[in-house]
Image (spheres, rainbow, N blue to C red):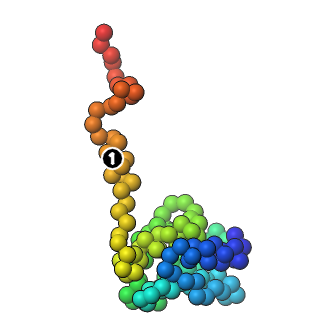
Amino acid sequence: MEFKHLVEAAEKWCSGNPFDLIFAEEDDERRLDFYAEPGVSFYVLCPGGTDNFHVWSESEDCLPFLQLAQDYISSCGKKTLLEVLEKVFTSFRPLLGLPDLEDDSFEHYHADMEGEPGPDHQQMGVSQQ
């Protein structure tokens, strides 16, 4: 993706949360820097070829919160910039004074799997007649 499109996507993402895009550089590295009060900052290195995104912070206080996003990026499959930014935002919610979002997708799945099958589900196995 062209760098200017990544910058546009980052600016649009910033409009829906407390972060501001404070710096975008394409010359030495394709880097986007973000900042939010109270002193939460990080940057994203954007892939230029087959590389993955990379997130980092020069703030010692922010680094531990980026682990979730770093793990997400290194997991299987290509990620989009917006997917990476959303994972970073989720990671930083406690630092921003926002409540944690509960990831209840597993709980919904697990709840669907419990109990007896509904009337529209057939039982597997040998039927006795």
Answer above or below: position of 68 versus 113.
Answer: below
Q: x%, y% of residue 25? A: 66, 86
Task: For mark 1, give the secondary structure.
Answer: helix
Task: Examine the rendering and report whether any part of residue 13 can be seen.
Answer: yes
Answer above or below: position of 69 versus 64.
Answer: above
Q: x%, y% of residue 128? A: 30, 13
Q: Residue at x 55, y 60 (%)?
A: 77
**From the image, which quarter does the N terminus lie in?**
bottom right
Mark 1, other Cα within 10 Å: few <14 / some 14–19 / many ≥20: few
Q: How many numbered marks, from 0 up?
A: 1
Q: x%, y% of residue 46? A: 61, 76
The quarter holding residue 90 reads: bottom left
Q: Residue at x 54, y 66 (%)?
A: 83
Q: x%, y% of residue 92? A: 41, 77
Outermost residue on the top side: it is 129
Amino acid under label 1? His
Q: Residue at x 64, y 81 (%)?
A: 30
Q: Nearer the viewer, residue 117 or 38?
A: 38
Q: Residue at x 45, y 87 (%)?
A: 37
Q: Which residue is mark 1?
A: 110
Q: Is residue 16 left or right of residue 67?
A: right
Answer above or below: position of 3 versus 103.
Answer: below
Q: Nearer the viewer, residue 90 or 57?
A: 90
Task: Examine the rendering and report whether any part of residue 64 can be seen.
Answer: no
Q: Is residue 71 left or right of residue 14?
A: left
Q: Nearer the viewer, residue 52 or 105?
A: 105
Outermost residue on the left side: it is 115
**From the image, which quarter does the C terminus lie in?**
top left
